[in-house]
Image (spheres, rainbow, N blue to C red):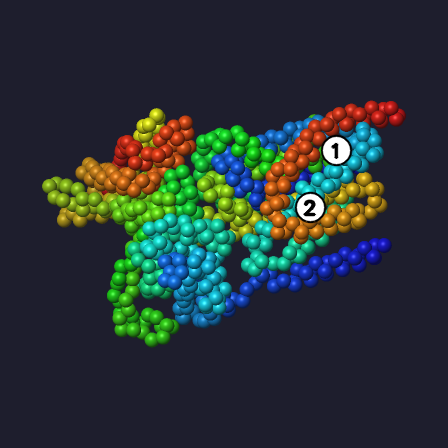
Amino acid sequence: MNIRKTKIFVALFFLVFAMFLSNDFGLINIEKTAIVTALAIDKGEKYNYKITVQVAVPEAGNANTENPKATISGEGDTVAGALKDAGSLSGWYLKLSFCNLLIIGNSLTSDSVIKELDFFAKTLNVQDSSLVITTDNNASELLEKASPLDNISSFALQKVLLKEPGFDSEVLPIDLREFVNGIYSKSSSAYMPLVKMVKQDSSSSGESKSSGGSESKDEKVVFDATTTALFKNGIMVGMLNKEQTFILKMLKGLTTSTTFPISALKDGEQTNYLINALRTTPKIKVSADNFNLEVDIFIDVYCKVVDQNAPWQDSENSRNVPLDSEVINASKEKLEKDIKSLIEIIKQTDCDLLGITDSVYKYHYPYYNQVKDFCVKNFTEKISVNVKGQK
Amino acid sequence: MKALKLRQVCLFFIAFIPINKLFLLPSLLARSANEDMWICTAINIIVDLLTVSVLTVCARKTNTDIFTMVENALGKVGAKILFFVYALFFMLKAILPIIEEKTYIEITLYEVFPKHLMFLPFFIVAFYLCIKKLRAVGRTSDIVWISTLVGLILLFALSIANCDFTALLPVGANGVSNVLKGARVGFIWHGDAIYLAFFLGQFYCHKKGAIKIFLSFLGGAICVLLFMVLFYGIFRSIAHRQIFALTDISKYSTVISNIARFDYLGIIALLFSGVFALTVPLYFAVECLMHIFSFKSRVLPSLIVNGLTFIAVILLRENYYGLESFAAYIGSYLSLFFCNVLPLFIPLLLRRSYKYEYTKN
């Protein structure tokens, strides 16, 4: 009986083992796989959408060769249809799980971008931690232009968009999850960086060795992502300039060691400073009662002077003495001015960047139905900026 | 010598309670109750804790197993009918989580959609586990609880920084009816307290032991509650669309972006525990059939239970929505009745059983 049992179990083991090995574990042919690093969506010519994917093609090579890249385009009436078309035309299987960047062309921002982004938010093939950006032109151009920062333009873009915490950055990046969350939240508001291309002429000596010959002059671009596009109900309704983007980032508590320039009158002479905001503590408090809404914005900033263009040597610099009152006042003025400018844009565009609607819903729910329709346009703001620091 | 130790009963609840509730249930609750979804889970937990309290009191007072107890109280025919119904119920309770985890594995771990027979090895493993005696359940708990805890700790550690706890405010804004609707949907996934009824008489339980069992159950339940809180805090308005929460909650951590998706180590650990957690209701279905038909060996009932479940999983593979609707309505009421209401009568059964034995002696 024991021998019989043993035989049955051994037979079962081999049966399971054989079944385990019968599938190829769902592996796909790497030679026919296109690892998509970025995806650009524009309005199509024949169909609704044109998708351009930037692909890093895995190829055997030595350490001196650059990673080859390619862009493939496809069109379709839906985003998924355009992706399928791109895959069919190229014969490649588009592996989207490494796609870290989604670019929306400006041709699509006048209508709800959720029509394009929702597919990526719902599918399990694309990470919803991918960055989303828009541009002032066609999205595909961002992928097709060469950049001196990186051979693959999407990697160059990601270098501009993402910096480690603690490093100076003027960009306010957002991922797909947060963007879609913002649109579907009570405020129906979200933002994303608007990337502009800045042309840089450079002669290519020693560059592009593997792309077949060097050219005498290459038009390369760098990317400026300091502008932020605002979205309400998925439609682009406005933009923030560099200063407004910076102050919004500060109000969201995303600035650490971020610098900003000021100009102060010191000893009768206009002096320019670059101030490093070492620590920023923002607080936004929303108070609501019947038909009234007050938003208290408070920022506490601890700064240090990085540089000043004074003609004389300031012997107090880098000795941790407190900041001059002129510098403190100039910093306060600049930050208050930027906050007021931001609030003006918020009220004009009805884009709730400060989460006022959500705050009313969470903390003042009894008044929510009364104030929700004019939450963003008709609130009274009270701004308070506290600056201290050292030289 | 008893089949189980007190320690193994406690570890059983820690190992197996959290697992099946981490897949589709969070998104279903978010659909019903939005930010109040954690209250739905809390209601399910409280109901289960009430059942556990009653059963731990019974565990202290009896050395008789549940089958003998019911037979003494209701007679042989009555007991057979009751356990037959329980066998069917346990098979029904097993089908939904099996299909859930099967779908999860197919969609997230495979690049190309695999054949449905891909999941057959699970049933072979389940068949093997079901032919073992109750002692094996205790020994399995001794091992699997580590895998469950490691998986949960890793996922929680990676996701807590991205959670906005204020997203759970305001409390109660969705209304009592939506919260109760969510709680009703959750009953089919909960109801793990019933397993303690089948452990009665199989382990020695003193006063402190009862407290330990209660706290172990509570610990496992709190892990589920914490998962729901983290889930909603991370996804907020889009929580109802995140159908497989397990893979998603930990991937937004900065360290994951910088290194790689090592959170899959935690996910695989939980899937490993999931193999055993999915087998538990099938095991007790086999137990019930053993006592109804007095099989000499567990092989045949195990084959019947696992075979029928496998056929049901294959037939229902394209009717998941219908199964989900059934589970959310009729299935939930059945679960509430069999897992939480009926066990409350065990003290009465115990009393009748004592009287029967007294009379017999």
Q: Is residue A303 left or right of residue B175?
A: left
- Residue B96: percent from left, percent from top: 64, 45
- The single residue placed furthest to the front in the displayed view is A46
Q: Residues within 10 Å of mark 1 (few under 14, many from 20)?
A: many
Secondary structure under the numbered disc 2 in the rendered image: helix
Q: Amino acid at mark 2?
A: Thr
Residue A390's image quarter?
top left
> In this rendering, does residue A305 appear at all?
yes
* Badge nearest the viewer, 1 or 2: 2
Q: Residue at x 67, y 36 (%)?
A: B334
**Which type of secondary structure does the marked residue at label 1 adopt?**
loop
What residue lies at 56% left-to-right and 51% top-to-bottom? B265
- Please give the name of the residue rendered at 46% of the width and 63% of the height, measured from the top-left corner: A85
**Which residue is under mark 1?**
B200
Q: Are marks 1 and 2 on the same chain?
A: yes
User: What numbered label is drawn on residue B279?
Assistant: 2
Amino acid identity at mark 1: Leu
